[in-house]
Amino acid sequence: MATLTGVRVILADDDGTRADLRTALGDEAGIEIVAEASTGDGALRAALWHRPDVLVVEPGMPDGAAVIRDVLRSAPDVAVLARTDDDDSLRTALRAGARGYIRKDAPLAAVIRAIHCVAAGDAILGPSITARLAELLAAPPMREEPRIPGLTARENEVLELIAAGLSNAAIVAKLRVAARTLRNHITAIFIKLGVENREAAIERARAAGLGRVENGLRSIA
C-alpha cells in the first residue's frame, strides 16, 4: 500500500538512465525513491527489505529477468513496472508477470502515470507495444543455454554478431535495441571475457565457434 509520503519505488537498472530517472523523480510529489540496484540480485534484496509499492526494472540488466519472477513469488504485493527499449527483455518481463511496461525514452509524465497506475493495481502498456502485444508474446524466447559460459543469452547473441563482423549500428538495427543498451552489453562482455578490445573478443568468440549468423548475413570462419 502506498504510504502518506507517496508511492514507494525501487529503481533497478545498470545504465545511466537510472540516475537520470532518479533525478527526475526526486522532486515529484507523491513518489519516494527508497532504494536503487544495478543487478537483479540487488533488486531482489532491496525489494524484500523495503517492500516498495513499485519496482521499476530493466529486465535486460544482469539477472533482470529472474528478479521479476522472484519478486512476484516472494513479495507478490510489489508491482513490477518494466522499463526497456529491448523487445526480448520486454517479452521476458511480460511472460514473467510484470504489471506494466514503459519505454526508456518515455516522457517523465508518462513514467509518473505508469508508476501510479501499477501501484494502484492496474496494468499499463506503452502505446508503442499495444498493437504488437500478440506478436511479442508469440515470438520464441531466446535460446536458454549460453554458447560461452558466464555470458547471458543476450550477451552471447551480441558477441556472435560482433564475431560475424557486424558494426554496432548493424547490431542495433538487427536486435532492435538502443545504442546505449548495446554499449552496456559490449562492456559486460569485455569484462566477463577478460579482454580489452573488440579484436580480442572476436578471437575468443571464434575460438568458441561463434560467428555464423542466420538470415543471409555474412559468416566468417
Image (spheres, grey):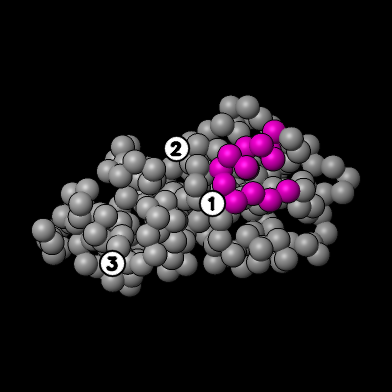
Q: Nearer the viewer, residue 135 or 81?
A: 81
Question: In this rendering, which labeled residue sits more in front, label 2 or label 3?
Answer: 3
Q: Is residue 45 magenta?
A: yes
Q: Quadrant of residue 161?
A: bottom left
Instruction: Say which element carries label 3.
Output: helix
Pointer 1 local density, CA inside 10 Å: few below 14, some 14–19, many at least 20:
many
Q: Amino acid at mark 3?
A: Glu
Give the prevailing secondary structure in the magenta stretch. helix
Q: Is residue 208 visible?
A: yes
Residue at position x 37%, y 60% in the image: 195
Q: Residue 138 at x, y = what percent?
A: 32, 41
Q: CA distance from mark 1 to mark 3?
A: 29 Å
Q: Which mark is residue 95?
A: 2
Instruction: Say which element carries label 1.
Output: loop
Q: CA distance from mark 2 to mark 1?
A: 14 Å
Q: Which residues are magenta?
A: 35-48
> Disc 1 marks which residue?
58
Q: Residue 139 at x, y = what percent?
A: 31, 44
Left or right of 2, for residue 144? left
Q: Amino acid at mark 1?
A: Glu
Residue at position x 39%, y 64% in the image: 196
Mark 1 or 3 closer to N-term?
Answer: 1
Instruction: Say which element carries label 2.
Output: helix
Q: Residue 136 at x, y = what percent?
A: 36, 48
Q: Amino acid at mark 2?
A: Arg
Q: Are marks 2 and 1 in contact (CB under 8 Å)?
A: no
Question: In this rendering, which labeled residue sits more in front, label 2 or label 1?
Answer: 1
Q: Quadrant of residue 219?
A: bottom left
> Disc 3 marks which residue?
199
Left or right of 73, for residue 174? left
